[in-house]
Image (cartoon, helix red, strand yellow):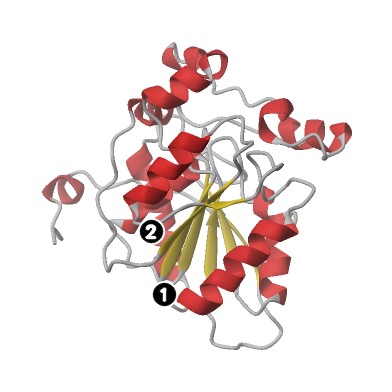
Amino acid sequence: MKVLRAREWAFPIAPVRREVRRATPELDEGKPPVLFVPGFGHGAWAFAEHWLEHTADRGFPAYAVSLRGHGDSAKAPKATLRAYAHDVAQVAASLPRRAVIVGHGAGALVTAHALARYPARAAVLLSPVFGGAGTALRNPMLSLPALFGGGLRLPAGQLFSRELPANAARGYAARLGRASTRAQWQLLRGRTPQPPVGDPPVLVVGSPDDRIVSDTALRRVARGYGGAPLLFPGMGHDLMLDTRWREPIDAILDWLEKSA
């Protein structure tokens, strides 16, 4: 196992102020903390809306981090995927017990990179966007602006099912920001993450009706971690905000109680 990374020692990531939201259970049952990592454009608010309190109600201490440049974390217009992964690993290492990391969208790729640096108890890759040509070809109107320095546009129709009321979908979409141009480039380039340290169990979760992640891409990521995806038909990309948000989080927590 490769432990020493000379380049990272020589060029350390600059520290920033990070937003971390939390919800803790009334009684400490000894369950591992769960750290939620939002995707590009999203902040910790995306998990604070429903999943943080629900996770705490199930007995798991719950945390959500806004990557640098997102949510209420410090601005970082030149951030890289490596800097985002550093944010995740640093926050996870600050938690009272070894954490479970749940990454969404491009945050799942960030989580995968963080797993090569932090020995997570377990990990969940939610609607994972691992980048590469497949992402660009599936959503050319979303991806092409990013090739020229623009933002990755995420309209409400791409993120949610039709079950979510239109005013709620538009409200969530209006809260989205954007990742740095460098990170967007790196996402589209699609560099494969290094293997996780400690060989944690990894669950891939998504929907076959996701308009951003194809079913083929979802299954490819799951195969890379030695399993099959857990699917929720009829839901959109942002599972944690869609109408049936309880179904995936309860399935994830049930899996954690058995696996972690």
Which amino acid does the dot numbered 2 rest on?
A: Ala
Decide which of 127, 11 is in the foreground and name it: 127
Left or right: 24 with respect to 32?
right
Q: Secondary structure at mark 1?
A: loop
Decide which of 141, 52 is in the foreground and name it: 141
Image quadrant assignment for residue 93: bottom left
Q: Is residue 207 visible?
A: yes
Q: Residue at image x 45%, y 15%?
A: 149
Disc 1 target residue: 98
Q: Position of residue 161 (x, y in %)?
A: 75, 37
Residue density around tag 2, few if under 14, some if 14–19, many if 20 or more, within 10 Å: many
- Above/below status of 155 relative to 89: above
Disc 1/disc 2 C-alpha distance (Å): 11 Å
Image quadrant assignment for residue 84: top left
Q: Residue at image x 36%, y 27%?
A: 132
Decide which of 62, 253 is in the foreground and name it: 253
Q: Secondary structure at mark 2?
A: helix
Question: Residue 228: which numbered mark, if any?
Answer: none
Q: Residue at image x 71%, y 59%?
A: 247
Q: In the rendered image, which quarter contains the N terminus?
A: bottom left
- Above/below status of 171 relative to 97: above
Q: Position of residue 82 (x, y in %)?
A: 33, 43
Disc 2 target residue: 89
